[in-house]
């Protein structure tokens, strides 16, 4: 299976998480929240062949870390994936929106001019703003909206401009997710845990190896055979990553 959005560097023991993912044959996109975190996090993943590390600058940190944009630009040629990036207008972060907007636009402009990268994007309470920026920069690369929480018309717009969707455990279990997920194009859905920020019933964080069970839960929601669901997701992953080859 695949986990297209996981914060490997934020688990207490990242290597054991990666080892369990590797043993389960799960592909992991290890996202980062600051450019300074990229080198160390990339090193953690290097010994596993199914791990890639994305270069990120999280919108919730943009106001403190905008000075790392030059490091972002320097590291960009080394990566195939960018994330976590985006905008966040939730209660505690909307006051920093101006800085977030500046950082996100600078990153998207860099991507648009380098031919694009696969992106994992945060859009909490800022779906319209994210989609407008993506629409204005059509060469920035395939955009994966992670943990989509927008409404139906925002979903339609996102589909129209070609976005992908990485679906996490909280989406599969929520009423909103149950309504929106079946409206997503079957050939543009992926899985994510967003671990360690999502917890299972036993309070342990979700991790990449859990995506195997998540695929089964998604198959029930979409009324698709378990084995077909896994094939669909793996085919989508292949089609997404063909952008890099
Ligand atoms: Mn995240």
Image (tube, rainbow, N blue to C red):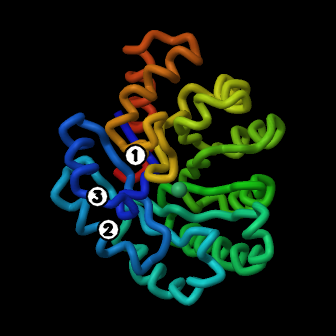
Instruction: Please name the residue that numbered disc 3 is placed on.
Output: 14
Residue at the spot 45% in from the left edge and 10% down from the top edge: 225
The disc, 3 or 2, on the residue closer to the chain's N-terminal end is 3
Q: Quadrant of residue 57?
A: bottom right
Count of numbered tags: 3
Residue at the spot 43% in from the left edge and 49% down from the top edge: 243
Residue at the spot 48% in from the left edge and 75% down from the top edge: 34
Q: CA distance from mark 3 to mark 1?
A: 24 Å
> Alpha-carbon neighbours of circle 1 within 10 Å: few (<14), some, or many (≥20)?
some
> Alpha-carbon neighbours of circle 3 within 10 Å: few (<14), some, or many (≥20)?
some
The vertical placement of 32 against 126, above or below, is below
Residue located farthest toward the front when viewing the structure as drawn: 202
Q: Which mark is residue 41?
A: 2
Given this view, does label 2 or label 1 mark the residue nearer the observer? 2
7 relative position to 156: left or right? left
Q: Which mark is residue 103?
A: none
- How far from the left and from the top, in percent, is residue 97? 76, 73
The disc, 2 or 1, on the residue closer to the chain's N-terminal end is 2
The answer to whether marks 2 and 1 mark residues whose Cβ atoms lie closer than 8 Å is no
Q: CA distance from mark 3 to mark 2?
A: 9 Å
186 relative position to 175: left or right? left
Question: Secondary structure beneath disc 3?
Answer: helix
The disc, 3 or 1, on the residue closer to the chain's N-terminal end is 3
Q: CA distance from mark 2 to mark 1?
A: 21 Å
The vertical placement of 86 against 104, above or below, is above
Q: Is residue 236 visible?
A: yes
């Amino acid at each position: 299976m695949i986990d297209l959005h996981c914060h490997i560097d934020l688990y207490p023991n990242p290597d054991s998480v990666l080892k369990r993912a590797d043993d389960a044959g799960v592909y992991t996109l290890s996202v980062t929240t600051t450019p300074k975190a990229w080198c160390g996090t990339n090193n953690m993943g290097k010994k596993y062949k199914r791990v890639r590390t994305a270069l990120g600058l999280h919108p919730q940190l943009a106001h403190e870390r905008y000075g790392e944009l030059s490091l972002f630009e320097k590291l960009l040629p080394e990566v195939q994936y960018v994330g976590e990036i985006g905008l966040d207008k939730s209660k505690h972060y909307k006051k920093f929106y101006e800085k977030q907007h500046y950082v996100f636009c600078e990153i998207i402009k860099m991507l648009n001019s380098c031919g694009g990268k696969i992106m994992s994007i945060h859009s909490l309470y800022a779906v319209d703003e994210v989609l407008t920026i993506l629409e204005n920069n059509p060469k920035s690369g395939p955009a994966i909206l992670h943990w989509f929480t927008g409404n139906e018309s925002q979903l339609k717009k996102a589909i129209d401009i070609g976005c992908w969707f990485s679906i996490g455990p909280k989406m599969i279990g929520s009423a909103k997710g149950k309504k929106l997920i079946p409206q997503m194009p079957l050939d543009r859905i992926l899985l994510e845990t967003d671990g360690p920020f999502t917890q299972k019933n036993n309070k342990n964080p979700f991790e990449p190896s859990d995506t195997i069970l998540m695929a089964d839960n998604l198959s029930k929601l979409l009324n698709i055979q378990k084995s077909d669901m896994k094939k669909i997701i793996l085919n989508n992953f292949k089609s997404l990553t063909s952008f890099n080859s």
